[in-house]
Protein backbone atom coordinates (compact mmCIF):
# COMPACT_ATOMS: atom_id res chain seq x y z
CA UNK A 1 0.00 0.00 0.00
CA UNK A 2 1.38 3.42 -0.95
CA UNK A 3 0.13 6.33 1.10
CA UNK A 4 -0.59 9.71 -0.45
CA UNK A 5 -0.51 13.01 1.39
CA UNK A 6 -4.05 13.69 2.57
CA UNK A 7 -3.34 17.38 3.17
CA UNK A 8 -0.30 19.62 3.43
CA UNK A 9 1.24 18.58 6.79
CA UNK A 10 1.78 21.48 9.18
CA UNK A 11 1.88 22.27 12.88
CA UNK A 12 1.47 25.35 15.01
CA UNK A 13 4.79 26.47 16.53
CA UNK A 14 4.75 29.31 19.06
CA UNK A 15 1.36 30.40 17.73
CA UNK A 16 2.29 30.33 14.04
CA UNK A 17 1.08 27.66 11.60
CA UNK A 18 4.21 26.25 9.96
CA UNK A 19 4.27 23.78 7.05
CA UNK A 20 6.34 20.69 7.77
CA UNK A 21 7.69 20.82 4.23
CA UNK A 22 9.39 18.32 1.97
CA UNK A 23 11.52 16.38 4.43
CA UNK A 24 12.34 12.81 5.37
CA UNK A 25 9.50 11.17 7.25
CA UNK A 26 12.05 10.20 9.93
CA UNK A 27 13.13 13.80 10.66
CA UNK A 28 12.86 14.47 14.38
CA UNK A 29 11.05 17.44 15.88
CA UNK A 30 14.42 18.63 17.23
CA UNK A 31 16.17 18.67 13.85
CA UNK A 32 13.15 20.23 12.18
CA UNK A 33 12.99 23.06 14.74
CA UNK A 34 16.71 23.78 14.59
CA UNK A 35 16.62 23.89 10.78
CA UNK A 36 14.06 26.68 11.18
CA UNK A 37 16.21 28.75 13.50
CA UNK A 38 14.64 27.65 16.78
CA UNK A 39 17.91 26.51 18.32
CA UNK A 40 17.04 26.72 22.01
CA UNK A 41 16.38 22.96 22.08
CA UNK A 42 19.67 21.05 21.86
CA UNK A 43 20.79 17.53 21.13
CA UNK A 44 22.67 16.18 24.12
CA UNK A 45 22.16 12.43 24.11
CA UNK A 46 19.68 11.65 21.29
CA UNK A 47 18.15 9.02 23.60
CA UNK A 48 15.74 11.01 25.77
CA UNK A 49 17.96 10.96 28.86
CA UNK A 50 19.29 14.53 29.16
CA UNK A 51 16.24 16.69 28.43
CA UNK A 52 18.17 19.38 26.56
CA UNK A 53 15.67 18.99 23.71
CA UNK A 54 12.50 19.42 25.79
CA UNK A 55 9.56 21.24 24.18
CA UNK A 56 5.87 21.67 25.07
CA UNK A 57 3.02 20.00 23.18
CA UNK A 58 -0.70 20.65 23.68
CA UNK A 59 -2.20 17.30 24.71
CA UNK A 60 -5.62 16.24 26.07
CA UNK A 61 -5.58 16.79 29.83
CA UNK A 62 -6.82 14.48 32.56
CA UNK A 63 -8.21 17.38 34.61
CA UNK A 64 -8.34 20.18 32.02
CA UNK A 65 -9.21 20.34 28.33
CA UNK A 66 -5.56 20.85 27.37
CA UNK A 67 -2.38 20.14 29.26
CA UNK A 68 0.99 21.55 28.22
CA UNK A 69 3.11 18.42 28.13
CA UNK A 70 6.91 18.37 28.04
CA UNK A 71 8.36 15.83 25.62
CA UNK A 72 11.75 14.94 24.14
CA UNK A 73 11.96 16.56 20.72
CA UNK A 74 14.93 14.36 19.81
CA UNK A 75 12.75 11.22 19.87
CA UNK A 76 9.56 12.31 18.13
CA UNK A 77 9.29 12.34 14.32
CA UNK A 78 7.92 15.73 13.34
CA UNK A 79 5.39 13.93 11.13
CA UNK A 80 3.76 12.65 14.33
CA UNK A 81 2.88 16.23 15.30
CA UNK A 82 1.08 17.07 12.07
CA UNK A 83 -1.85 19.29 12.98
CA UNK A 84 -0.66 19.67 16.56
CA UNK A 85 0.40 22.66 18.65
CA UNK A 86 3.93 23.10 19.99
CA UNK A 87 5.74 25.71 22.10
CA UNK A 88 9.52 26.02 22.37
CA UNK A 89 11.59 27.95 24.90
CA UNK A 90 11.65 30.84 22.42
CA UNK A 91 7.85 30.99 22.51
CA UNK A 92 7.53 31.33 26.28
CA UNK A 93 8.91 34.85 26.69
CA UNK A 94 10.99 37.57 25.08
CA UNK A 95 14.24 39.29 25.97
CA UNK A 96 12.17 42.28 27.07
CA UNK A 97 9.49 40.36 28.95
CA UNK A 98 10.70 37.11 30.46
CA UNK A 99 8.31 34.28 31.21
CA UNK A 100 7.98 33.70 35.00
CA UNK A 101 9.95 30.43 34.69
CA UNK A 102 12.72 32.15 32.75
CA UNK A 103 12.81 35.01 35.24
CA UNK A 104 13.14 32.74 38.28
CA UNK A 105 15.88 30.70 36.60
CA UNK A 106 17.77 33.92 35.84
CA UNK A 107 17.49 35.69 39.19
CA UNK A 108 18.27 32.54 41.22
CA UNK A 109 21.34 31.54 39.24
CA UNK A 110 19.78 28.50 37.60
CA UNK A 111 21.84 28.78 34.41
CA UNK A 112 25.58 28.80 33.79
CA UNK A 113 26.74 27.61 30.37
CA UNK A 114 23.11 27.60 29.23
CA UNK A 115 23.23 24.48 27.08
CA UNK A 116 20.61 22.64 29.13
CA UNK A 117 18.64 25.70 30.24
CA UNK A 118 15.98 25.84 27.46
CA UNK A 119 15.13 22.19 28.15
CA UNK A 120 14.82 22.85 31.88
CA UNK A 121 12.67 25.90 31.07
CA UNK A 122 10.21 23.82 29.03
CA UNK A 123 9.99 20.97 31.57
CA UNK A 124 9.55 23.52 34.36
CA UNK A 125 6.88 25.36 32.36
CA UNK A 126 4.92 22.14 31.91
CA UNK A 127 4.81 21.72 35.69
CA UNK A 128 4.12 25.46 36.14
CA UNK A 129 0.96 25.06 34.06
CA UNK A 130 -0.09 21.70 35.52
CA UNK A 131 -3.68 21.96 36.80
CA UNK A 132 -3.98 21.69 40.59
CA UNK A 133 -0.27 22.30 41.03
CA UNK A 134 -0.94 24.27 44.21
CA UNK A 135 -3.19 21.55 45.64
CA UNK A 136 -2.06 19.15 48.36
CA UNK A 137 0.63 17.10 46.58
CA UNK A 138 -0.72 13.70 47.65
CA UNK A 139 -4.12 14.48 46.12
CA UNK A 140 -2.72 14.29 42.62
CA UNK A 141 0.57 12.48 43.21
CA UNK A 142 0.10 9.20 45.08
CA UNK A 143 2.97 8.35 47.38
CA UNK A 144 4.99 5.33 46.32
CA UNK A 145 8.58 4.22 45.96
CA UNK A 146 10.49 7.40 45.13
CA UNK A 147 7.82 9.71 46.56
CA UNK A 148 7.03 12.87 44.64
CA UNK A 149 9.05 15.68 46.18
CA UNK A 150 6.95 18.83 46.16
CA UNK A 151 7.61 22.38 47.28
CA UNK A 152 5.20 24.56 49.21
CA UNK A 153 3.88 25.80 45.86
CA UNK A 154 2.98 22.24 44.83
CA UNK A 155 5.77 22.05 42.25
CA UNK A 156 6.71 18.38 41.77
CA UNK A 157 10.49 18.33 41.49
CA UNK A 158 10.31 14.96 39.73
CA UNK A 159 8.91 16.79 36.71
CA UNK A 160 12.57 17.70 36.09
CA UNK A 161 13.83 14.14 36.50
CA UNK A 162 14.53 13.87 32.76
CA UNK A 163 16.70 17.00 32.62
CA UNK A 164 20.43 16.92 33.35
CA UNK A 165 22.73 19.85 34.18
CA UNK A 166 26.48 19.35 34.19
CA UNK A 167 27.73 22.72 35.43
CA UNK A 168 25.17 24.83 37.33
CA UNK A 169 24.15 22.33 39.96
CA UNK A 170 20.59 21.57 40.90
CA UNK A 171 20.07 23.66 44.05
CA UNK A 172 19.45 26.99 42.26
CA UNK A 173 17.23 25.20 39.72
CA UNK A 174 15.22 23.74 42.60
CA UNK A 175 15.05 27.20 44.19
CA UNK A 176 13.65 28.61 40.95
CA UNK A 177 11.03 25.85 40.73
CA UNK A 178 9.87 26.32 44.30
CA UNK A 179 9.62 30.11 43.87
CA UNK A 180 7.03 29.93 41.09
CA UNK A 181 3.57 31.24 41.88
CA UNK A 182 0.34 30.52 40.04
CA UNK A 183 0.08 31.73 36.42
CA UNK A 184 -1.55 35.11 35.97
CA UNK A 185 -5.21 35.09 34.93
CA UNK A 186 -4.34 36.62 31.55
CA UNK A 187 -1.44 34.24 30.88
CA UNK A 188 -2.12 33.05 27.32
CA UNK A 189 -0.82 29.51 27.87
CA UNK A 190 -2.81 29.17 31.10
CA UNK A 191 -5.98 30.34 29.34
CA UNK A 192 -5.23 27.94 26.48
CA UNK A 193 -5.77 25.00 28.86
CA UNK A 194 -9.52 25.70 28.84
CA UNK A 195 -9.91 24.77 25.16
CA UNK A 196 -9.28 21.30 23.73
CA UNK A 197 -6.08 20.58 21.82
CA UNK A 198 -6.22 20.18 18.04
CA UNK A 199 -7.84 16.96 16.89
CA UNK A 200 -5.33 14.50 15.46
CA UNK A 201 -4.81 15.01 11.75
CA UNK A 202 -5.05 12.09 9.34
CA UNK A 203 -1.50 12.15 8.00
CA UNK A 204 0.13 10.62 4.96
CA UNK A 205 3.72 11.54 4.15
CA UNK A 206 6.15 9.94 1.70
CA UNK A 207 9.88 10.50 1.29
CA UNK A 208 12.87 8.62 -0.10
CA UNK A 209 13.34 7.00 3.33
CA UNK A 210 9.83 5.62 3.68
CA UNK A 211 6.24 6.48 4.52
CA UNK A 212 4.50 7.88 7.60
CA UNK A 213 0.81 7.30 8.16
CA UNK A 214 -1.62 8.37 10.87
CA UNK A 215 -4.86 6.45 10.23
CA UNK A 216 -8.08 8.11 11.42
CA UNK A 217 -9.47 4.98 13.12
CA UNK A 218 -8.34 1.70 14.62
CA UNK A 219 -9.95 -0.25 11.79
CA UNK A 220 -8.01 1.80 9.24
CA UNK A 221 -4.78 1.09 11.11
CA UNK A 222 -5.55 -2.63 11.27
CA UNK A 223 -6.32 -2.66 7.55
CA UNK A 224 -2.85 -1.31 6.78
CA UNK A 225 -1.21 -3.80 9.16
CA UNK A 226 -3.02 -6.64 7.40
CA UNK A 227 -1.46 -5.55 4.09
CA UNK A 228 2.03 -4.50 5.18
CA UNK A 229 4.14 -6.85 7.28
CA UNK A 230 7.01 -4.32 7.19
CA UNK A 231 5.03 -1.67 9.10
CA UNK A 232 6.27 -0.35 12.45
CA UNK A 233 3.74 1.17 14.86
CA UNK A 234 4.69 4.16 16.99
CA UNK A 235 3.01 5.85 19.95
CA UNK A 236 5.35 7.88 22.16
CA UNK A 237 8.43 7.00 20.06
CA UNK A 238 10.53 6.62 23.22
CA UNK A 239 11.89 3.32 21.87
CA UNK A 240 11.69 3.87 18.10
CA UNK A 241 13.33 7.30 18.47
CA UNK A 242 16.42 5.68 19.94
CA UNK A 243 16.47 3.14 17.11
CA UNK A 244 16.32 5.98 14.59
CA UNK A 245 18.95 8.17 16.24
CA UNK A 246 21.49 5.69 17.56
CA UNK A 247 21.13 2.67 15.29
CA UNK A 248 20.08 4.36 12.05
CA UNK A 249 16.86 2.37 11.72
CA UNK A 250 14.64 3.53 8.85
CA UNK A 251 11.34 1.61 8.80
CA UNK A 252 9.75 1.61 5.34
CA UNK A 253 6.35 2.37 6.87
CA UNK A 254 5.62 3.98 10.24
CA UNK A 255 2.05 4.01 11.55
CA UNK A 256 1.14 6.45 14.37
CA UNK A 257 -1.46 5.05 16.77
CA UNK A 258 -1.06 7.29 19.83
CA UNK A 259 -4.22 9.33 19.29
CA UNK A 260 -6.58 6.52 18.26
CA UNK A 261 -9.57 6.81 20.60
CA UNK A 262 -10.12 3.05 20.55
CA UNK A 263 -6.69 2.63 22.19
CA UNK A 264 -7.26 5.26 24.87
CA UNK A 265 -9.91 3.59 27.03
CA UNK A 266 -9.89 4.04 30.78
CA UNK A 267 -12.45 2.37 33.04
CA UNK A 268 -12.30 1.46 36.73
CA UNK A 269 -15.15 -0.98 37.22
CA UNK A 270 -15.99 -3.12 40.28
CA UNK A 271 -14.38 -6.22 38.77
CA UNK A 272 -11.61 -4.89 36.54
CA UNK A 273 -9.53 -1.94 35.41
CA UNK A 274 -9.14 -1.37 31.66
CA UNK A 275 -6.20 0.70 30.44
CA UNK A 276 -5.96 1.72 26.80
CA UNK A 277 -2.65 0.71 25.27
CA UNK A 278 -2.03 4.21 23.88
CA UNK A 279 -2.54 6.07 27.16
CA UNK A 280 0.76 7.51 28.32
CA UNK A 281 2.18 6.42 31.66
CA UNK A 282 1.64 9.94 32.99
CA UNK A 283 -2.02 9.83 31.97
CA UNK A 284 -2.50 6.43 33.60
CA UNK A 285 -0.75 7.58 36.78
CA UNK A 286 -3.06 10.57 37.09
CA UNK A 287 -6.23 8.71 36.12
CA UNK A 288 -5.56 5.92 38.62
CA UNK A 289 -4.59 8.44 41.32
CA UNK A 290 -3.07 5.74 43.53
CA UNK A 291 -5.95 3.26 43.28
CA UNK A 292 -3.54 0.53 42.07
CA UNK A 293 -0.73 0.85 44.65
CA UNK A 294 1.66 -1.47 42.80
CA UNK A 295 1.56 0.77 39.73
CA UNK A 296 1.81 3.86 41.94
CA UNK A 297 5.15 2.49 43.14
CA UNK A 298 6.26 1.64 39.61
CA UNK A 299 5.60 4.95 37.88
CA UNK A 300 8.16 7.17 39.67
CA UNK A 301 10.84 4.57 38.90
CA UNK A 302 10.01 4.26 35.19
CA UNK A 303 12.58 6.39 33.34
CA UNK A 304 11.74 10.09 33.83
CA UNK A 305 8.70 12.34 33.64
CA UNK A 306 9.72 13.40 30.11
CA UNK A 307 9.72 9.78 28.98
CA UNK A 308 6.52 8.90 30.86
CA UNK A 309 4.81 11.80 29.13
CA UNK A 310 5.21 9.88 25.85
CA UNK A 311 5.75 6.23 26.75
CA UNK A 312 2.79 3.84 26.78
CA UNK A 313 2.21 0.45 28.39
CA UNK A 314 1.27 -0.87 24.95
CA UNK A 315 4.66 0.20 23.63
CA UNK A 316 6.52 -1.23 26.63
CA UNK A 317 4.82 -4.60 26.10
CA UNK A 318 4.92 -4.43 22.32
CA UNK A 319 8.72 -4.46 22.16
CA UNK A 320 8.80 -7.79 24.02
CA UNK A 321 11.87 -6.60 25.93
CA UNK A 322 12.92 -8.75 28.91
CA UNK A 323 13.92 -5.62 30.87
CA UNK A 324 10.81 -3.50 30.49
CA UNK A 325 9.61 -2.15 33.82
CA UNK A 326 5.87 -2.66 33.38
CA UNK A 327 5.79 -6.45 32.70
CA UNK A 328 6.91 -7.58 36.21
CA UNK A 329 4.27 -5.38 37.85
CA UNK A 330 1.55 -6.38 35.39
CA UNK A 331 2.42 -10.07 35.77
CA UNK A 332 1.98 -9.73 39.54
CA UNK A 333 -1.37 -8.06 38.90
CA UNK A 334 -2.42 -11.03 36.71
CA UNK A 335 -3.00 -8.74 33.74
CA UNK A 336 -4.46 -9.80 30.40
CA UNK A 337 -4.14 -8.14 26.99
CA UNK A 338 -6.77 -7.50 24.36
CA UNK A 339 -5.15 -8.05 20.95
CA UNK A 340 -7.04 -6.59 17.97
CA UNK A 341 -6.79 -7.33 14.25
CA UNK A 342 -9.12 -7.33 11.28
CA UNK A 343 -9.94 -10.90 12.26
CA UNK A 344 -11.38 -9.69 15.56
CA UNK A 345 -10.21 -9.44 19.14
CA UNK A 346 -8.75 -12.01 21.52
CA UNK A 347 -7.75 -11.88 25.18
CA UNK A 348 -4.35 -13.27 26.15
CA UNK A 349 -3.08 -13.60 29.74
CA UNK A 350 0.15 -11.63 30.03
CA UNK A 351 1.78 -14.71 31.56
CA UNK A 352 1.28 -16.45 28.17
CA UNK A 353 2.18 -13.44 26.02
CA UNK A 354 6.00 -13.65 25.93
CA UNK A 355 7.42 -16.58 23.97
CA UNK A 356 11.13 -15.76 23.54
CA UNK A 357 13.66 -12.95 23.43
CA UNK A 358 11.64 -10.01 22.03
CA UNK A 359 9.09 -12.50 20.75
CA UNK A 360 5.41 -12.68 21.69
CA UNK A 361 2.17 -14.35 20.60
CA UNK A 362 1.09 -11.08 18.94
CA UNK A 363 0.86 -11.46 15.17
CA UNK A 364 2.23 -8.84 12.79
CA UNK A 365 -1.31 -7.70 11.96
CA UNK A 366 -2.37 -7.30 15.61
CA UNK A 367 -2.22 -4.34 17.96
CA UNK A 368 -2.37 -4.34 21.74
CA UNK A 369 -5.68 -2.57 22.36
CA UNK A 370 -6.30 -2.79 26.11
CA UNK A 371 -4.62 -3.99 29.29
CA UNK A 372 -7.05 -5.59 31.77
CA UNK A 373 -6.33 -5.77 35.50
CA UNK A 374 -8.72 -7.99 37.50
CA UNK A 375 -10.13 -6.77 40.79
CA UNK A 376 -10.00 -6.99 43.75
CA UNK A 377 -6.31 -6.26 44.16
CA UNK A 378 -4.03 -8.16 46.51
CA UNK A 379 -3.66 -6.26 49.81
CA UNK A 380 0.14 -6.53 49.90
CA UNK A 381 2.02 -5.32 46.84
CA UNK A 382 5.42 -3.89 46.00
CA UNK A 383 7.65 -3.06 43.05
CA UNK A 384 11.39 -3.50 43.47
CA UNK A 385 13.73 -2.12 40.83
CA UNK A 386 17.43 -2.90 41.16
CA UNK A 387 19.53 -0.56 39.02
CA UNK A 388 22.69 1.50 39.26
CA UNK A 389 20.66 4.68 39.63
CA UNK A 390 17.50 5.16 41.65
CA UNK A 391 15.74 6.93 38.78
CA UNK A 392 15.99 7.14 35.00
CA UNK A 393 17.88 3.89 34.56
CA UNK A 394 17.45 0.45 33.01
CA UNK A 395 16.67 -2.34 35.44
CA UNK A 396 19.19 -5.04 36.23
CA UNK A 397 16.35 -6.85 37.99
CA UNK A 398 12.73 -5.82 38.48
CA UNK A 399 10.20 -7.63 40.67
CA UNK A 400 6.48 -7.13 41.17
CA UNK A 401 4.72 -8.63 44.21
CA UNK A 402 1.03 -9.24 44.92
CA UNK A 403 0.45 -11.33 48.07
CA UNK A 404 -2.76 -12.16 49.93
CA UNK A 405 -2.57 -13.35 53.55
CA UNK A 406 -5.58 -14.34 55.66
CA UNK A 407 -5.47 -15.63 59.24
CA UNK A 408 -1.70 -15.89 59.05
CA UNK A 409 -1.72 -18.12 55.95
CA UNK A 410 -0.66 -17.12 52.45
CA UNK A 411 -3.80 -17.48 50.33
CA UNK A 412 -2.34 -16.29 47.02
CA UNK A 413 1.00 -15.13 45.66
CA UNK A 414 1.84 -13.68 42.27
CA UNK A 415 5.40 -12.54 41.57
CA UNK A 416 6.53 -11.06 38.26
CA UNK A 417 10.20 -10.96 37.28
CA UNK A 418 12.12 -8.93 34.71
CA UNK A 419 15.77 -8.90 33.70
CA UNK A 420 16.50 -12.50 34.75
CA UNK A 421 15.66 -14.43 31.59
CA UNK A 422 14.99 -14.01 27.87
CA UNK A 423 11.46 -12.93 28.75
CA UNK A 424 9.62 -11.45 31.71
CA UNK A 425 8.13 -14.34 33.69
CA UNK A 426 6.15 -15.40 36.74
CA UNK A 427 8.17 -16.88 39.64
CA UNK A 428 6.06 -20.05 39.64
CA UNK A 429 8.28 -22.14 41.94
CA UNK A 430 8.45 -19.37 44.50
CA UNK A 431 4.70 -18.79 44.35
CA UNK A 432 4.03 -22.51 44.91
CA UNK A 433 6.39 -22.51 47.91
CA UNK A 434 4.42 -19.64 49.47
CA UNK A 435 0.76 -20.48 48.83
CA UNK A 436 -0.84 -22.36 51.70
CA UNK A 437 2.10 -21.79 54.03
CA UNK A 438 2.27 -19.62 57.16
CA UNK A 439 3.24 -16.00 56.56
CA UNK A 440 6.47 -16.34 58.52
CA UNK A 441 10.17 -15.65 58.22
CA UNK A 442 10.92 -19.36 57.86
CA UNK A 443 8.46 -19.73 54.97
CA UNK A 444 9.85 -16.67 53.22
CA UNK A 445 13.49 -17.72 53.67
CA UNK A 446 12.70 -21.11 52.15
CA UNK A 447 10.91 -19.46 49.22
CA UNK A 448 13.71 -16.89 48.82
CA UNK A 449 16.21 -19.69 48.20
CA UNK A 450 14.00 -20.93 45.37
CA UNK A 451 13.47 -17.44 44.01
CA UNK A 452 17.22 -16.93 43.67
CA UNK A 453 17.18 -19.76 41.13
CA UNK A 454 14.20 -18.49 39.12
CA UNK A 455 14.96 -17.64 35.51
CA UNK A 456 18.36 -17.88 33.86
CA UNK A 457 20.17 -14.71 34.94
CA UNK A 458 22.88 -13.57 32.55
CA UNK A 459 26.11 -11.62 32.81
CA UNK A 460 26.15 -8.25 31.08
CA UNK A 461 27.37 -4.69 31.65
CA UNK A 462 24.50 -3.96 34.05
CA UNK A 463 25.03 -6.87 36.46
CA UNK A 464 26.47 -10.36 36.80
CA UNK A 465 24.32 -13.48 36.92
CA UNK A 466 25.35 -14.15 40.53
CA UNK A 467 24.38 -10.60 41.52
CA UNK A 468 20.98 -10.93 39.85
CA UNK A 469 20.35 -14.26 41.60
CA UNK A 470 21.31 -12.78 44.95
CA UNK A 471 19.04 -9.77 44.40
CA UNK A 472 16.05 -12.03 43.70
CA UNK A 473 16.35 -13.81 47.04
CA UNK A 474 17.09 -10.63 48.97
CA UNK A 475 14.16 -8.86 47.37
CA UNK A 476 11.65 -11.35 48.77
CA UNK A 477 13.13 -11.02 52.25
CA UNK A 478 13.05 -7.25 51.95
CA UNK A 479 9.38 -7.41 50.94
CA UNK A 480 8.52 -9.64 53.91
CA UNK A 481 10.28 -7.58 56.56
CA UNK A 482 8.83 -4.33 55.28
CA UNK A 483 5.31 -5.78 55.43
CA UNK A 484 5.89 -7.15 58.93
CA UNK A 485 7.22 -3.80 60.15
CA UNK A 486 4.20 -2.04 58.66
Image (cartoon, rainbow, N blue to C red):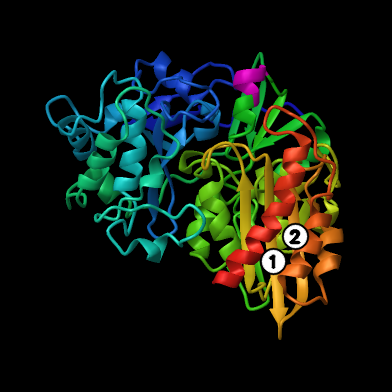
Q: Nearer the viewer, residue 376 or 2?
A: 376
**Magenta highlight: main SS:** helix
Question: Badge 1: few (under 14), some or many (20 or more) residues near its Cα, within 10 Å?
Answer: many
**Residue 295 shown left or right of residue 413 in the figure:** left
Q: x, y percentage for residue 330?
A: 70, 57
Q: Is residue 26 visible?
A: yes
Q: Which callout, 1 or 2, points at the residue further toward the start of the chain?
A: 1
Q: Quadrant of residue 333?
A: bottom right
Residue positioned 23% across, 44% down in the render: 188
Q: x, y percentage for residue 24?
A: 58, 17
Residue positioned 33% across, 56% down in the render: 131
| Element at label 2 | strand
Q: Extreme bottom residue here?
A: 407
Is mark 1 in CB contact (under 8 Å) with mark 2? yes
In the picture, the disc for residue 402 is 1
Assign the C terminus to one quadrant of the image. Answer: bottom right
Q: Is residue 219 visible?
A: no
Q: Quadrant of residue 88?
A: top left
Q: Magenta stretch?
A: 243-248
Assign the N terminus to one quadrant of the image. Answer: top right
On screen, 292 above or below 39?
A: below
In the picture, the disc for residue 415 is 2
Q: CA distance from mark 1 to mark 2?
A: 6 Å
Amino acid sequence: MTTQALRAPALTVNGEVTPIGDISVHTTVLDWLRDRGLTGAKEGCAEGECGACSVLVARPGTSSATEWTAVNACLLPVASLDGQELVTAEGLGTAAVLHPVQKEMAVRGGSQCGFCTPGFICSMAAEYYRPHRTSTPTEHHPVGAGDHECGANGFDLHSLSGNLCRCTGYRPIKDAAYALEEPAENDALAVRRNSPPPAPAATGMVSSEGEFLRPPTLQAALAVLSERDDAVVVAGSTDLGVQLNIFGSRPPLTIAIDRLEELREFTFAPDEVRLGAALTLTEIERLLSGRVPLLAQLFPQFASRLIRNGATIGGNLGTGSPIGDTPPALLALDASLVLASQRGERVVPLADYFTGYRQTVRSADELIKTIILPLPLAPMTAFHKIAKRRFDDISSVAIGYAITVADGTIQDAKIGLGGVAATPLRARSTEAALIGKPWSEQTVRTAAALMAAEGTPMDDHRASSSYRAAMLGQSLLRFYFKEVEA
